[in-house]
Amino acid sequence: MSIRIAPSILSANFAALGEDIRTVEEAGAHLLHVDVMDGHFVPNITIGPPVVKSIRKATKLPLDVHLMISDPDKYIPAFVDAGANMLTVHAEATVHLDRTLNFIRSHNVGAGVSINPATPLVAVEHALGLADMVLIMSVNPGFGGQKFIPYTLEKIRQARQIIESRNYRCIIEVDGGINTDNLPDVITAGAQVLVAGTAIFHAPDPARKIKEMLEIAAPLGYHAKYV
């Protein structure tokens, strides 16, 4: 199966969000990455369930909702009702990760767990068998347009080794500073879902940028065997 490209709407034009979503959908994007920030867990505020509900009406693509918020359990039902297909919570933001992942699963949507760049993989190692996806942040969350942190490549490799050695079905997503220059390294390390915001939506031709990413990813797609 192919590597999946997930445009992050954080970098889209919110005054023309529906148009931007149609552009990336028609260009071959596999899902939409929706960054939810609360101004508490991260130093920025973005969107909530009402906007997710509007996005759900504007696209057939799966909505990959990334909850960069404190106390995520409180808001999981609202985002499920709004139309999320995958809900990802931060290990750093929840005290009882096992309980939270099971709570997400009980709503019949995908359950993901994310870790910040400086958080060691061991913090979520025992949850990988429960999660549908692990999101490895390759920048510090909160803002778009940051540069990829190189040492996160090793965390991707470690995650791939654990998942394969234990025959888990958990897939690896990477978010932060992804562009055509580092795409091969990230995929070779083991990533299967690639989140890109600035690289796509700030490009002169976002549709062409997605196609370029897909062309680069195609010969490396063997890493996506669990997608």
Image (cartoon, rainbow, N blue to C red):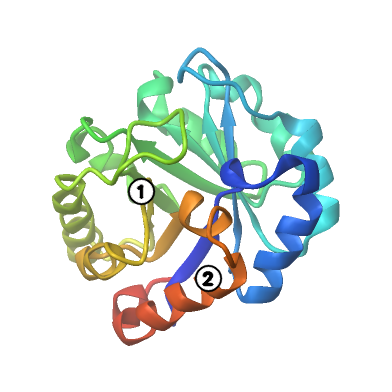
Residue drawn at (29%, 75%), measured in percent from left and top?
223
Amino acid of disc 2: Ile
Q: Which mark is residue 157?
A: none
Q: Is residue 75 above or below residue 163?
A: above
Residue drawn at (54%, 53%), measured in percent from left and top?
202
Image quarter where the N terminus lies is bottom left
Q: Is residue 174 above or below residue 40?
A: below
Image quarter where the C terminus lies is bottom left
Residue that mark 1 sits on: 177
x, y percent for residue 216? 36, 79
Q: Quadrant of residue 77?
A: top right
In-front residue for pair 207/168: 207
Q: Secondary structure at mark 1?
A: loop
Q: CA distance from mark 2 to mark 1?
A: 15 Å
Residue that mark 2 sits on: 210
x, y percent for residue 193? 43, 62
Amino acid of disc 1: Gly
